[in-house]
C-alpha cells in the first residue's frame, strides 16, 4: 500500500499472491525466505516511497536481524519492521508518563511498543535498515494507525476474491 503521510491518504494498493514456502513461522533463519517475496512485490512499483513499513521484524528478532533488515539491505530505501506480537525482547518503560515502551535485548534498545488506538495491545516496531530507531518511531507515530486496519481489510478481501 502506498500511503501519503502528509496528506494521510492511501494512494494505491498492490497485492500479489505467492505460494507459501513454509506453513509456519519459526523465529530462526527461516525469515530469510520472506526477502524475495518483498523484493518481488516492490520491483514493479512505479512510485518510489521515502520509506517502507513492512509487517515483519527488524532488529526485534532473536538474531537482532529479521526480515525487515534483510529486505532493507537489498534496497536503498529505509525500512521499518512492525509486528502485532512481540517475538523477542523485553518491554521496559522508555520515558516516564509515556504510553510507549522500549523493547530491549539486555540493555540495548532494539525497538518500541506503540499502543494500538482503543486497545491494550501494541504494534512492535524496529528498524530494518537505512533509518535510525528514533526516526522510525517518529514516522510510525505520524501515521494514521487506522491505515493498518484498512490494509488488513483490503488484504483479506483480496484473499477472499482470489480463492473464489
Image: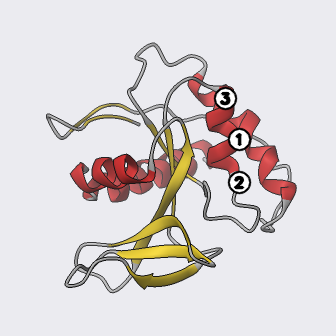
Residue receiving disc 2 = 65
Residue 31 place in picture, x, y as percent: 77, 53
Instruction: Give the spatial CA distance, label 3 vs label 2.
Output: 17 Å
Q: Which numbered circle lies on residue 33? A: none
Residue receiving disc 1 = 70
Task: Quadrant for residue 51, please give it.
Answer: top left
Residue receiving disc 3 = 39
Examine the rendering and report whether any part of residue 135 can be seen. yes
Secondary structure under tag 3 reads: helix
Q: Residue at x 56, y 23 (%)?
A: 76
Q: Is residue 34 left or right of residue 163?
A: right
Q: Residue at x 31, y 75 (%)?
A: 100
Q: Are marks 2 and 1 in contact (CB under 8 Å)?
A: yes
Task: Quadrant for residue 106, please give it.
Answer: bottom right
Whether residue 111 is situated above or below residue 81 in the rendered picture: below
Q: Is residue 163 left or right of residue 151?
A: right
Q: Are marks 1 and 3 in contact (CB under 8 Å)?
A: no
Secondary structure under tag 2 reads: loop
Secondary structure under tag 1 reads: helix
Q: Nearer the viewer, residue 164 or 104?
A: 104
Q: Which mark is first along the chain, 1 or 2?
A: 2
Q: Is residue 92 left or right of residue 11?
A: right
Instruction: Give the spatial CA distance, label 1 vs label 3.
Output: 10 Å
Amino acid at each position: 500500500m502506498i500511503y501519503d503521510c502528509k496528506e494521510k491518504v492511501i494512494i494505491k494498493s498492490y497485492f500479489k499472491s505467492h505460494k507459501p514456502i513454509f506453513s509456519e513461522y519459526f523465529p530462526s533463519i527461516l525469515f530469510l525466505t520472506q526477502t524475495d517475496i518483498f523484493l518481488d512485490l516492490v520491483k514493479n512499483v512505479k512510485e518510489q516511497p521515502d520509506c517502507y513499513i513492512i509487517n515483519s521484524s527488524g532488529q526485534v528478532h532473536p538474531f537482532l536481524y529479521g526480515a525487515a533488515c534483510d529486505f532493507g539491505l537489498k534496497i536503498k530505501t529505509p525500512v521499518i519492521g512492525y509486528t502485532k506480537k512481540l517475538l523477542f525482547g523485553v518491554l521496559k518503560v522508555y520515558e516516564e508518563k509515556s504510553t510507549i515502551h522500549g523493547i530491549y535485548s539486555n540493555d540495548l534498545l532494539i525497538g518500541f511498543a506503540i499502543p494500538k488506538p482503543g486497545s491494550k495491545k501494541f504494534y512492535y516496531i524496529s528498524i530494518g535498515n537505512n533509518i535510525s530507531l528514533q526516526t522510525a518511531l517518529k514516522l510510525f507515530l505520524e501515521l494514521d494507525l487506522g491505515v493498518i486496519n484498512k490494509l488488513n481489510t483490503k488484504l483479506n478481501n483480496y484473499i477472499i476474491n482470489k480463492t473464489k
